[in-house]
Amino acid sequence: MSAFENEDVVRLNDDKNAALPESQKKSGEFSRQAEKSVFNELTLNRSLLEQYKRAVDVSSIVSKTDPYGTITFVNDQFCRISGYCREELIGATHRLIRHPDNTELLFRDMWQTIRARKVWQGVIKNRRKDGTAYYVDSVIVPMLDPSGQINEFMSIRTDVTDLIEQQSLIERQFTDPLTGLPNRQKLTADLEADGERSFLLIDVSDFSEINEYHGYTVGDQVLKALAVMMQRLISQDTKLYHLGGDIFGVLTSQRLDVNQVTSLCNELSRRISSYPVIIEDQQFPLSVVIGAGSGTSAFIEADIALHSAQEKQLAFEVYGQGSRLKKRIEDNISWVGRIRDAIRHDRIEVFAQPIISTRSGEVEKYECLMRLRDEDGELHSPYAFLEAAKRARLYDSLTRIVIYKAFQHFSTRTEDFSINLTARDILNTETVDTLLRKAQMYELADRLIIEIVESEGIENYTQVSQFIAQAKEAGCRIAVDDFGSGYSNFEYLLKLDIDFIKVDGSLIRHLDTDANTRMLSEMIVSFGQKVGAQTVAEFVHSEAVKQAAEAIGFDYLQGFHTGKPKPLV
């Protein structure tokens, strides 16, 4: 047909339309507009569906299976995370990527749900082609045909491996590896979440003897067995913790009154002592000491009560039953606040007390002593606040402040100076590193004397001996402080390479009047001379004591009579 003929046809049609009634013309026009509108809507919906599909395809791990579980489709994300190519997956089942850690119960529940035409959702652990694991949060949707029968299953998954591993890491951080119980970190978090509960702090009596005589492996088995026993003894809404070593904790779900706490302590103590732990057919009778507290300060109360029970040799003590115990904790809480405030405002000061040579009569050394200055300017010696500092975990900070200030001051002087360290300090690698680093930095190791506080007992000879060797290699000298205060042991002085023996004031203060203390002091001086250690008489408070110490043969004197502690300036 030519263009002219076509034009005639168009004109003819127009003529026919012109001949139609007006109502039919409008009806036809409306029909065309409706068709166009439907077409546009379908086009838009199709475009949106394509965009949705693309969004899901990019962000999610998608697969489809037939009603029997055979894979019919996987997207690129599925191939990427699983490590399998599309050809390996199509025609297989999801058993190909199933991790053996999953239980059969999980998949039984999943199949029962989706075969009932319901959506199933859950986290599944899968295994890549290279054997590594990954986790997916899965949603499985049954796709139904017009008759309501299952045509296929569509699975849409999200990779949650990082989240699961992070949760697992948190759980490990909150779990004691030996017993599987929640640890000290978890207890701290639980106490902060809700302080209005009751708490029991449980110490296994003489547990160190089991480790010493039967070995740490048996000791660990005893602790695990004890954990199982205690778990059975407490109610389901009460939580058991292993806080390290031979210390356990019990946290109730709500605050108990004094009678209820007493009953719980009594029951635990009685049952544990009644049933020995059996390891490899050997019985280990156990007993515990318990301290209990309640409310927002439950842990501190329990700690104080435990120490009180140990001092009184009781099976347990509940905070609140005695006003003296209550005052003790109130004092501790008060001191913790004052210590923190003093640290914050640089009111932890270092004083130096002179140590006089009996040969020259001159000051040859100084001992560095800690003092805390209150807001009102009042000074306090460590005896008033060290226990509170230890319980509040502020003690190590105090030690390091003394180290910093002592080195700063004596870097401009010529005398020797000493810094006190307890066994606790020696076992703290950060404190030891700080001390030796400062000695090297200021080049003062040859003038530094490290005083090991003997009154607390030096139980871990191996680690103390290692520290002494390390300090001496750096050029420092070692003194044992408070010797003769009750824990004294000449044997360990032979084992440890000591330069100075500082004799405790309990012996020196009556040196001029008490024949027994004079005889014991003479023995220590003689012993020091034989092992090559110089001796220092502490607490020289009068001229008579000074003369008695000089007569016995002490190398150095220290006390208020020979020189009071003064602030470093």
Image (cartoon, rainbow, N blue to C red):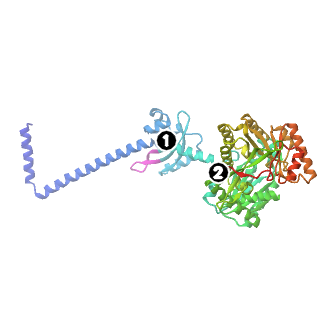
Q: Nearer the viewer, residue 370 or 276?
A: 370
Which mark sits nearer the N-terminus, 1 or 2?
1
* Amino acid at circle 1: Gly
- Residue at 9 percent across and 40 percent down: it is 6
- Residue 513 at x, y = what percent? 91, 54
Q: Is residue 473 above or below residue 396?
A: above
| Residue 142 forms part of the magenta stretch | yes
| Residue 258 forms part of the magenta stretch | no
Residue 269 is drawn in which quadrant? bottom right
- Residue at 62 percent across and 47 percent down: it is 173
- Residue 30 at x, y = what percent? 19, 55
Q: Nearer the viewer, residue 399 or 114?
A: 399
Horizontal side of 253 relative to 150 (left or right) equals right
Q: Is residue 417 above or below residue 200?
A: above
Residue, disc 2: 185
Which span of residues is magenta-colored? 140-156
